[in-house]
Image (cartoon, grey):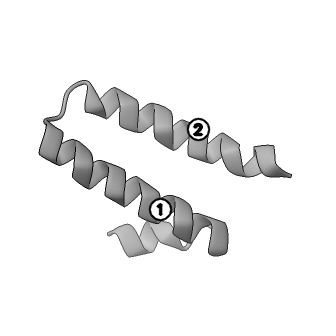
Amino acid sequence: MKWIRYTPIGLLILGSLTLTTVQTHWELSILTGVFLAIISKGMRRPRSNKTEIN
């Protein structure tokens, strides 16, 4: 069951790494914080985090 969580999280990590190569450091820290919030909220209530981000 754990790999089910790690799959979307892995995609987020890969996406963040792709962005990090282009973005600046302060933007990276913001993106990292956002991704961590998405991951923490996603584990509690999946798919509800998308509306909260906007």
- Expressed as whole percent of the image width and height from the top left, the position of residue 22 reads 20, 27
Image point (49%, 43%), residue name: 12
The image shows a total of numbered marks equal to 2
Of the image marks 1 and 2, the number of the one nearer the N terminus: 2
The answer, for residue 47, to whether it is visible in the render is: no
Report which quarter residue 43 is drawn in: bottom right
Residue 7, which numbered label?
A: none
Q: From the viewer's perspective, is 45 left or right of 18?
A: right
- Expressed as whole percent of the image width and height from the top left, the position of residue 21 reads 26, 24
The residue to which callout 1 is attached is: 38
- With respect to residue 18, does 28 lie above or below? below
Judging depth in this view, the residue of 18 and 50 nearest the camera is 18
Judging depth in this view, the residue of 27 and 46 nearest the camera is 27
Q: Which quadrant, please, contains the C terminus?
A: bottom left
Report which quarter residue 18 is drawn in: top left
Image point (62%, 46%), residue name: 8
Image point (43%, 73%), residue name: 51
Q: From the viewer's perspective, is 51 left or right of 21?
A: right
**Residue type, mark 2 in image:** Gly
Report which quarter residue 28 is drawn in: top left
The reply to whether the C-beta atoms of the residues labelled 1 and 2 are less than 8 Å apart is no
- With respect to residue 30, does 12 lie above or below? above
Judging depth in this view, the residue of 51 and 37 nearest the camera is 37
Dot 1 falls on a residue whose secondary structure is helix
- The alpha-carbon separation of the residues under discs 1 and 2 comes to 12 Å
Residue 10, which numbered label?
A: 2
Image point (49%, 70%), residue name: 49
**Residue type, mark 1 in image:** Ile
